[in-house]
Amino acid sequence: MEKKVSDISIVIAGAAGQGVQTVEELLVGILKMSGYNIYATKEYESRVRGGSNSTEIRVSSNRVSTFVNRIDILIPLNSAAFSHVESRLSEHSMIITDPSLLEGIQNLKEEQIISFPFSKIAKDVGSKIYANVVAVGAIAGIFKTDPKIAKNVLTNRFSSKGSKIIDNNYTAFLKGYELGKQVVENGKYAINLSTNNNIADEILLNGNQAVGLGAIAGGCNFISAYPMSPSTGALQFIAANSEEFGIIIDQAEDEIAAINKNIAAWYTGARALASTSGGGFALMTEGVSLAGIMENPIVIHIAQRPGPATGLPTRTAQEDLNLALYAGHGEFARIIFAPGTIEQAFYLTQKAFNLADKYQIPVFILTDQNFVDGYYNIPKFDLSKIKVEKAFIKTEKDYLRYKFTKDGLSPRGIPGYGDGLVRADSDEHTEAGQITEDMEYIRPEMVKKRYYKRLKLLEDVADKPEIVGAADFSTLVVCWGSNYTVVKEAIEEFGSKEIAMLHFHQLFPLHPNTKEILNKAKKVIIIENNASGQFANVLKLYCDLSIPEKHKYLNYTGKLFAVEDVLDILQKEAN
Amino acid sequence: MDFNDFNENDYDMPCEKAWCPGCGHFTAQKILRQALAELKIPNEKLVFVSGIGQAAKLPQYTKGHMFNGLHGRSLPAAMAIKACNPELTVIVNSGDGCSYGEGGNHFLAQIARNADITQIVHNNMIYGLTKGQASPTSLKGMKTPVQVSGVTNEPFNPLAVAIAMGATFVARIFAGNMAQAKEVIKQAIQHKGYALVDTLVQCVSMNKLNTFKWYKENTYELDDSHDVHDKKAAFAKSLETGKYPTGIFYKVEGNPTFSESSVAYKNDKSPLYSRNLDMNKLEKLIISKRKR
């Protein structure tokens, strides 16, 4: 194949339990430590064994952070894999496979197939279970990576299983490696990507881990959560580091308990994260309202998936913006973030803890399955940019929790720190926290404090949307959250001097200049993973901008946007 | 204030109380205030947690920190408050509807954690604030505006459930028996671990069946022959109906509390609010992500 490429998309497909993830981990480890840029993501069914799952690994000379439909190399682990990814295969796709899997498979050309008896080689090494590692070796051979790197990766991966298993894996790897090298030497297939030694030093984090790490960096020391796909990874990341950082972990009986515990933890001066998906968050909404009237900080991570109800548990969507925006009965202010990159997930989550503390409000982090499961190499975070800014005060004897102040923020005390009493109430209350039904003065003042005045303060510190692409744009492609990377890559590849992306990582409240930016464009189109154009409706409400239906590109399939999908949209809009 | 000069009135908030004249909650609050004064717990070390209902107004009228949260959710909040600052004394006061109905799942789950909190359930066998519907503990046959032909549900048995779930302190008191009630509350607060005090109180406005007189006639004090460390005997006592035993049914000392079991307190006993993020550890964690 002579096609000049800067990145290769490798797809591993098979049933749950067949080792798709192990192949992914080994290949990512070997290729990243060899100096290639990496992006990886998985798509999987809601089951533990069987079915059809796949992982995509993009290996690139340049940074990569998003999904392509195109498959350059397919590693099938079963025959069903071919039909599972059929629509993504082309005559340019290479298939690296055990010959036994090709029976009954048509439409493939001879020169597309690199067939090795992986299973037989594995059996010769000692067991069929090494077949996947032989395949990993073949890929590593094609990329001509240094086998020493693979040895390290295999040793780390199988360290708990003893030296015999490590040795067998390495033997299996080397057999595959030789076969891969021969493919290149025979001229059947070659890859010429450039490497960069600095990449080995970069870090790999998926979206869940970035949220978890951001939370820890934000001083999170309490998490009560009920496991729910696709958010569970964030909980598990924090749990894995709980001893080191002194974090209380509570697996709650349900999400109602979880949100109430997290709110009470903040009340006591801890910093808590509520992490869930849409269905779990639906249960939490009464707690959001509690935080609203108590003027109690809370940070809430919602990893979205398609609904309604159980929906598609392991697929992706941006369907819960409305839910986050309107959650909780009554009226009170809030912030909603939706990170577009792994870096943003880290820094925004970290910042969310400071903002929640300072403004005594719920702060949301909206991610989705596509975002939390995808990962790529990034430079290490700059810790000089972050600080845990605790906003509570030491109370005095005459302390009033809800004292009226000019800006509407009452200094927040916590029980046991100072001489005052901290009296928080879910009923409408006086400055002292005592129940009141005074509707002449106290009630309206409390509403102003919790809603109007607070919202004004939040607008003053709102983040601007980011423009990427043509500075002198006439068309703006609006997107939010996880679609940052796919739209960015498509816009850069499309290279039009007319088109720019406007990405929102803060969805509410909007930066005051948003309307002005949008008005500069002759045409605004929007890309969202939902059916109703939830963010388009936010723009209509708060920026008086009506995006015509034909310019709304709404994907509610449960699948993520691929770069090709966005290129098609840009092509259509450019014509 | 002189350290030895603790008075029950120090725990009273000078405000109007929205309870009906003759309500059992007045007595229950007085008993609690007396117990706190005798235990000499300063107001600023006390956190009163409640859900919603008539009983749940107790923190409003009692002097200490207050977290008057949502209906049914007092236990999750109390558990978290104690977990984040073990130096605080955390006391939950809510009614039978809030604690055993709306909060039933939390009741089971928090008992299992053995958080070091005291849960006082004001059990009047009726929904008071919503005006007279059945509660989980209402007796069969009681007619209400909703259960028009009488309650058909089996009454919830909080003591049996608590013992079965492994609660480390389980008691029932009748607020009308102030001397015993105060001693039990004191022991419950001093108990290290979760303590349930099911507190029988009369609802003068809504429950015409289980009146002060009814409770007086249908309760009896457990005497010294009952071994509070005998779980099977406690369970048998908890199943008694007709005449209801009062006193401590069961207790076990020395079980680790939620905080004691938490890794967050393994190397550091200080409350969470006083701690700072270790940036060196954070840096190390980030560097460890070079490999996946």
Image: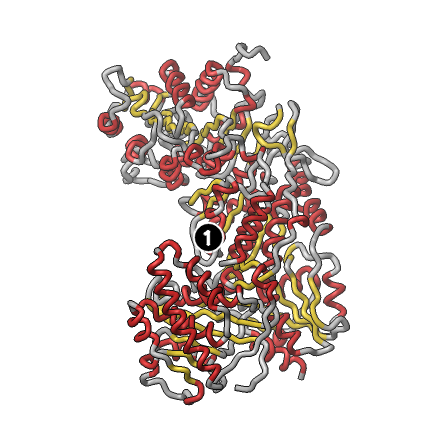
Question: For the point 50% across and 74% down, which residue is it?
Answer: A144
* Residue A85 appearing in the image: yes
In depth, the one of A230 and A549 nearer the eye is A230
Q: Name the residue under label 1.
A: A280
Colouring used for the render: secondary structure
Determine whether A79 is above or below A325 in the image.
below
Return the x and y of residue A524 as percentages of the image width and height: 68, 72
Left or right: residue A217 versus residue A276 is: right
Return the x and y of residue A565 as percentages of the image width and height: 56, 76
Return the x and y of residue A333 as percentages of the image width and height: 64, 48
* Residue A556 appearing in the image: no
Determine whether A118 is above or below B203 in the image.
below
Determine whether B215 is above or below B260 in the image.
above
Number of marks in picture? 1
Return the x and y of residue B56 as percentages of the image width and height: 47, 31
Left or right: residue A370 versus residue A390 is: left
Chain name for mark 1: A
Q: Quadrant of residue A100?
A: bottom left
Say what secondary structure mark 1 lies in: helix
Determine whether B144 is above or below A196 in the image.
above
**Where is the C terminus of chain A found, in terms of image quarters?**
bottom right
Kind of residue at badge 1: Gly
